[in-house]
Image (cartoon, rainbow, N blue to C red):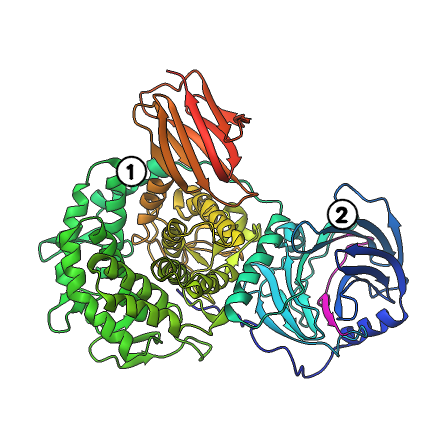
Amino acid sequence: MAPSKHAVLERPASDAPGASAYALAVRDDLRDGERVADLTLGDLTVTVCRGRDSVLVVVRRPGNGGLALRAIHAPAGTLTVRVVASEPGEALRLEANSALGRHEVAIAASEADLHRLRVCVWLTPRAPLLVPFHPRDLYPLDANDDPLGATGQVEAAQRGVNSGLLYFRFREPAFGSVLYFQNLSALNDYYAATDTVPDGAVGGEWPELGYLLPTPPQSGTPPTNPLAAGERVMLSDAILVFRDEADDDEQELSRQFLQLLGIAYKALSLPRTDYRDWAGLAERTLTDLETAPQASVRHYGHRYVMPYPDGEYPDVMVQVSVLAAIHDYGRWRGEPLPLEDELRRGLPRFYDEKLKTLRRYLPNVGDDKDADAVDSWYLYHPMLNLARLALDGDADARALLMRSVDYGIKAAHHFKYRWPIMYDIRDFTVKTRARNDDRFGQTDVGGIYAYLMLQCYQLTDEERFLHEARAAIDAAVGMRFNLEYQANLTAWGAAACMRLWRITNEGTYLAQSYVYLASFFHNCMIWESDVRLAKHYRTFLGATCLHDAPYMAIYECFDAFTAFEAYLADSGPDLEPAARMLIGEYCKYALDRAWFYYPSALPDEAIAGPPHQSGVINRKLAFPLEDLYGNGEPAGRVGQEIYGSGAALVFASRSHHSVEGAPFRLFCNLFVRTIERTGERALSLMLDGGETCQADLSLVRLKRRRMPQKVTLTSANGDVLRPHATDKDRIDFRVPASGRLILTWSA
């Protein structure tokens, strides 16, 4: 997974080196400008002010400073502003005219939970309009409306093309903390017209923060992609959520971030999700794993899965990951699969009798590989999957795990629970200490290590494993929004914290799980990109695989999905509702979005080819591409993942549910917490998603069976839910994501 070239803003925002002309202009406009309108937002006041070339929306906490949001920037000629009739859901609507054209501004306010303000801006240009520069739009203010007088801290800002968010808190004055969320989904038309990408667009240097409207790179001959004359285009959809607290405690800061993000999320128009036949794709995947010559190779008389088609060498993480997914799928089908036993028999060849641990490669690996080099997380991930198998009764997996785990503990002690990127497995000599920012190693390896230790504790009842889990989680305290190195490791860290809380009843571990979750969702794309080739696939709520990676990867996608299943299973009513909602929504959209990693779901032009393709891609194989890009680069530049083939098996076994004696399977794109047969043709279901969210529930006809004549789905309070689509093969419902449902059907 290649590191991104893009820098990330995460630094103290005080002691700014200077102020731009735009920050100084805000101060003057607030002093000399014309008040246009006023609103209230709970204990906050909202004022719209017209300056010389701008319209500012000013939010104040009386006596404790505020924020100025530049809604319009029109640096050409006279700017006139008037209030016009509001549309449903709006608190205020403005129209402004200038030499650029006509701006429209719609302001909506909500006090139902934490205070939320939404400011939408459109422009209809008078003439074909080039946009060479547009300043950032957000300025913290002191009690005298001076952006140079307020001090504060930026905790998180947009990374690459992930969510356009900014999370910051005031030090002085005591305004509180703020989440700024730019709804990038709404701005695709602008990106298409100007051929731009919102890469790192939300951030800034205090006191000039917020959204930097992407513009073409300037040079002697800059690109000329104008906004069309007379065509209305959205320039900004800014959502701000406010808290009157600005806690510096890492755990509370993270919990509040999840709360604020949840409030912003509820304001979005969410993209649709579609039924995906993961069960059918899983069967095709199994066939290809068993029969495709590119999928496996034989060594020492055993079958080994290849990481990529026609490339690389057998790899222990690949072997155990695919094995665990096949095991889950066989259990779901009700019978073990022969391939599972084949792959299991080859595992001992990865074991090093001298070191007493698993190695990445087989002993006969080629000289072109450094057989002694190990990524820190690679030592533990195979053991985590062995533990999953052992907990399900696999004696061989348990024996191999117990022979290997002490070396993993030795490594943790050597590095004092702060792992480098790569080291020599023989003596722990560091090969690569830190990632490309030269500050941190694999910061979230302690999370997956802790989860492994808790699995071993469950298997053995040995207190030393519980001690190790606590030590690893405790060592990661203080990382704040720098905690994530790799998305799936961060998700397992959250699951480890939740499990520790359940075991110890110490609330600090529940709170620490929010630190892992905040770092995970900071690195998600909470927008649907139509930029360039991304219009051919879906990106919403995808997590970039690494903290600085330019792409989403299938392995991290479904492994995080599995970790979040464990997290929710261990949770209870004490879980922060916003955390429950965001996890549920991530998993729901993963089941939809992950379909597009498969080459068969993409047109030819969306898949990388020479010279940009680094591996072999065979569209006929039911193996996923490794990489999808929110910036619209061709998918599959890294290659096609056989080691990600477990995705279809995992998704099928979690989303499709067999109903004994029924002519259908039940599909749900949220985790079904319980299914109880309450009658011969009746089921009671409990869903575990966000309180205000929706889920898709489908009845999927089994082969050679006929759908029931009558199907009735009701909520716990007796409301009958009507299907939104019906045909001979499927009945689709959209249902509340949280609560109980009752399904009945006729013979």
Q: CA distance from mark 2 to mark 1?
A: 48 Å
The residue segment tinted magenta is 120-142
Of 425 and 288, which appears nearest the observer? 425
Tag on residue 231?
2
In the visual, does 450 lie left or right of 597? left
In the visual, does 199 lie left or right of 373? right
Taking the spot 58% from the left edge, 66% from the top edge, the residue there is 200
Q: Nearer the viewer, mark 2 or mark 1?
A: 1
Q: Residues within 10 Å of mark 1 (few under 14, many from 20)?
A: some
Instruction: Quadrant for the C terminus, please.
Output: top left
**Residue 365 visible, this orientation:** no
| Residue type highlighted by circle 2 | Glu
- Label 2's element? loop
Of 213 and 395, which appears nearest the observer? 395
Of 583 and 702, which appears nearest the observer? 583
Q: Which residue is mark 1?
A: 283
Instruction: Quadrant for the N terminus, please.
Output: bottom left
Taking the spot 75% from the left edge, 48% from the top edge, the residue there is 232
Decide: is 681 above or below 239. above
In the visual, does 353 lie left or right of 412? left
- Label 1's element? helix
Q: Quadrant of residue 70?
A: bottom right
x and y, in percent, of residue 476 in the image: 41, 72
x and y, in percent, of residue 350 in the image: 16, 63
Q: Quadrant of residue 591?
A: top left
| Residue type highlighted by circle 1 | Glu
